[in-house]
Amino acid sequence: MHALVVYESMFGNTRAIAEAIAKGMSTRAKVRVTDVVDAPAEVPPEVDVLVVGGPTHAFSMSREATRQDAARRGGAHTDVPAGIREWLRELPDGDHPQTFVAFDTRVDLPLVPGAAARSASRQARKRGFTVADPESFLVEGYEGPLADGELDRATAWGRRLGEQLEQDLRTKAAFRAAGDAR
């Protein structure tokens, strides 16, 4: 199984979560991790699962204005021109064979509506991906750091994700083989 993990990170928290997810998935898959600024314009055909994550800005995926604000607060300038919102929007429409899974980082506050992962999942579904349940990881404050235990939780989530997707691929292969035998 091949996985591509694409992330957007202004303060390094989402990057750390992406790397932890990849570490967990690497027990079941060959995983490539890339910043959104270096992400391919199309998902390579050998990729079975596309994992996409970004910070939650203003209850959704970041926008150029929110990334500029984060950069003014000391965040990285590399992701200001385009984040996961723009990258997903530019992916070709169609029947994508890959499973799409989103994650985000967000402030640990009760009853905060919206999350970048849910918005990314909606956009991916519109683009033609099969979408799995998203996950949120918590940061303390606007810039972070990550809340205690979140890196371990991300690694464990990545491991479970890899196991589930591997099982799903085996099931799909078995159905194809049964159909070919007819």
Image (tube, helix red, strand yellow):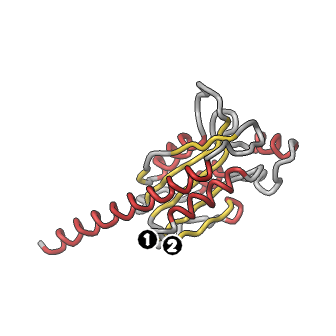
Q: Quadrant of residue 180?
A: bottom left
Q: Is residue 106 left or right of residue 64?
A: left
Q: Residues within 10 Å of mark 2 (few under 14, many from 20)?
A: few
- Name which residue lies at 57% across and 42% down: 136
Give the secondary structure at mark 2.
strand
C-beta proximity under 8 Å, tags 1 and 2:
yes
Q: How far from the left and from the top, in percent, is residue 86? A: 65, 51
Binning the other alpha carbons within 10 Å of mark 1 as few (below 14), some (14 to 19) or many (20 upward) gives some
Name of the residue lying farthest toward the left:
182
In the rendered image, the vertical position of residue 134 relative to residue 44, given as above or below: above
Q: Residue at x 47, y 55 (%)?
A: 100
Q: Which residue is mark 2?
A: 30
Q: Which residue type does callout 2 highlight? A: Lys
| Whether residue 153 is situated above or below residue 119 in the rendered picture | below
Badge 1 amino acid = Met
Nearer to us in this view, 69 or 104: 104
Does label 1 or label 2 sit earlier along the sequence? 1
Q: Residue at x 67, y 51 (%)?
A: 14
Q: Which residue is mark 1?
A: 1
Image quadrant containing the N terminus:
bottom left
Provide residue 43's location: percent of width, then percent of height: 53, 65
Is 92 situated left or right of 139 in this image?
left
| Quadrant location of the C terminus in the rendered image | bottom left
Q: What is the secondary structure assignment of the residue under circle 1?
A: loop
Q: Which mark is residue 9?
A: none
Q: How many marks?
A: 2
107 w.r.t. 175: above or below: above
Indicate whether 77 appears above or below 61.
below
Question: Residue 9 appears at what percent x and percent y?
Answer: 72, 52
